[in-house]
Every structure is written in structure tokens, then in C-alpha cells.
Image: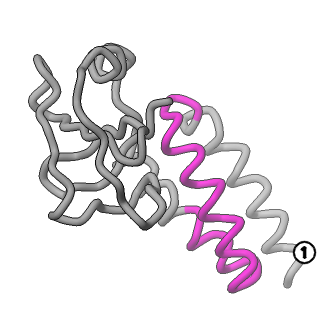
Amino acid sequence: MNQILAASLLIGGLTIAPAAFAQEGTLSGAAGGAVTGAVVGGPVGAVVGGVAGAAVGTILDPPPAEVRTVVVQQTTPSVVYQQPVVVGQPLPTTVVLYPVPGYDNYYYTVVNNERVIVDPQSRTVLQVVN
């Protein structure tokens, strides 16, 4: 039974792979989710984790290079935040967000001297720009 499941995972992974390469966030989300799922729930957990990770990775695709360029050019003071800034996690409401000029779908802030691009609706960190 385990051999059949492993073989089907391998074949399924080969069929999905070309489509996954089209979205960088989907691929890395699927890979991370699959690894986490495998550790927690074995082969079945890997499948479930891979699907969930792909969904999150697709949602959190990094912003276009133009957005990063605009954010780097901004002169915004840095705020101190005691927690680590993690991609995929929201920032608290105490951290002020600023709109990215010319890009309504993205906001940014500077936290601990790192520029951070954020989804304005969920306050979720999309990318840390160094």
C-alpha cells in the first residue's frame, strides 16, 4: 500500500511540476507545505501539506520588481519591532503602513531598518527587501 501511495505521489508530482514552475510562490509554497506535512503526517500529510502550501504560495507571490524599486527609493523612517518580520505573517496595527506610489495593491513600511512590502488589506508581509 505504501509503495503504491509513494509511486502515485511521484507520478502526480511529475505531472504537476511544469505548471508549478509558472508561479514561483506556488512552487515554494507547495514544497514547504509538503515537507512540513510529511514530517507531521507522513505521505498523506505530504499531499495535504503540498496542496495547502501551494495555495498559500500562490496568494503570497512576491510583488513585481518595479514595486521593489519604488519602495527602495522611498525615504521613510524605520520603526523598531521586537518580533521577527516573517513573510506570510501579518504586521500589527501599531506598525504604520505607507502606500507604494503608483501601486495601489501594495503598501510598505520600514521595520528594524528593513523595507517590507505588505498586502494592505490583510497587513500580511509579502516580501522583505534588503
Would you say the magenta stretch is mainly helix, strand or loop?
Answer: helix
Left or right side of 56 for 94: left
- Total numbered labels placed on residues in the image: 1
Residue at the (73%, 44%) spot, across then down: 14
Left or right side of 44 for 54: left
Taking depth in this image into account, of 22 and 63 the one nearest to the observer is 63
Is residue 28 depicted above or below 108 in this figure? below
Q: Residue 107 appears at what percent x and percent y?
A: 19, 37
Residue at the (56%, 39%) spot, across then down: 20
Left or right side of 19 for 41: right
Element at label 1: helix
43 drawn magenta: yes
Taking depth in this image into account, of 57 and 67 the one nearest to the observer is 67
- Magenta span: 21-50
Q: Residue 65 appears at what percent x and percent y?
A: 39, 17
Quadrant of the rendering where the N terminus is positioned:
bottom right
Q: Residue 48 appears at what percent x and percent y?
A: 56, 73
Is residue 47 depicted above or below 88 in this figure? below
Residue tagged 1:
3
Name which residue type carries label 1: Gln
